[in-house]
Image (cartoon, helix red, strand yellow):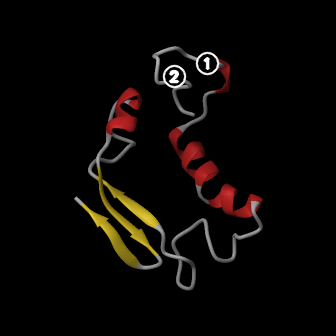
Amino acid sequence: MATRTGWDGKTWGANQRITLDEALRVNTINGAYNSHEEAIKGSIMPGKLADFVVMADDFHTVDKEKIKDIEIVRTVVGGSTVYQA
């Protein structure tokens, strides 16, 4: 979304790029709103489902082209760790 670059290295619709914060919002709060689940999903708050990942790097500080390569070090689903590197 932020680079509009496919796995083959080609750029698709460069004029449709969005910021990293916009991409995060699309995949969290906006996605939950779209499925009418914003009361239980989309943000980390007491009472909401606790599904999230912990990444090895801050995607705001790495080169946009390297975001796809950031290691997932922990995955939490329903408040329980289901994966830990």
> Mark 2 belongs to which amino acid?
Thr
Is residue 33 toward the left or the right of residue 7 in the image?
A: right
Is residue 70 toward the left or the right of residue 26 in the image?
A: left
Compared to 23, does 78 lie above or below? below
Compared to 65, does 58 lie above or below? below
Q: Residue at x 39, y 60 (%)?
A: 53
Question: What separation in Å lies between label 1 and label 2 (alpha carbons)?
Answer: 6 Å
- Please name whichever residue, 33 or 19, is drawn nearer the observer in this view of the structure: 33
How packed is label 1: few (under 14 Cα within 10 Å), some, or many (20 or more)? few
Q: How many marks?
A: 2
Tag 1 secondary structure: loop
Where in the figure is residue 23, as x and y percent of width and height? 57, 43
> Mark 1 belongs to which amino acid?
Trp
Where in the figure is residue 80, as x and y percent of width and height? 38, 78
Q: Residue at x 47, y 78 (%)?
A: 78
Tag 2 secondary structure: loop
Is residue 9 toward the left or the right of residue 62 in the image?
A: right
Residue at far bottom of view: 47
Q: Residue at x 51, y 26 (%)?
A: 3
Q: Earlier in the sequence, mark 1 or mark 2?
A: 2
Where in the figure is residue 51, as x and y percent of width and height? 48, 69
Q: Residue at x 56, y 25 (%)?
A: 4
User: Which quadrant is the C terminus positioned in?
Assistant: bottom left
Q: Are marks 1 and 2 in contact (CB under 8 Å)?
A: yes
Residue at far top of view: 10
Q: Which residue is mark 2?
A: 5
Residue at far front of view: 82
Q: To which quarter of the image does residue 1 belong?
A: top right
Is residue 35 toward the left or the right of residue 68 in the image?
A: right
Q: Which residue is mark 1?
A: 12
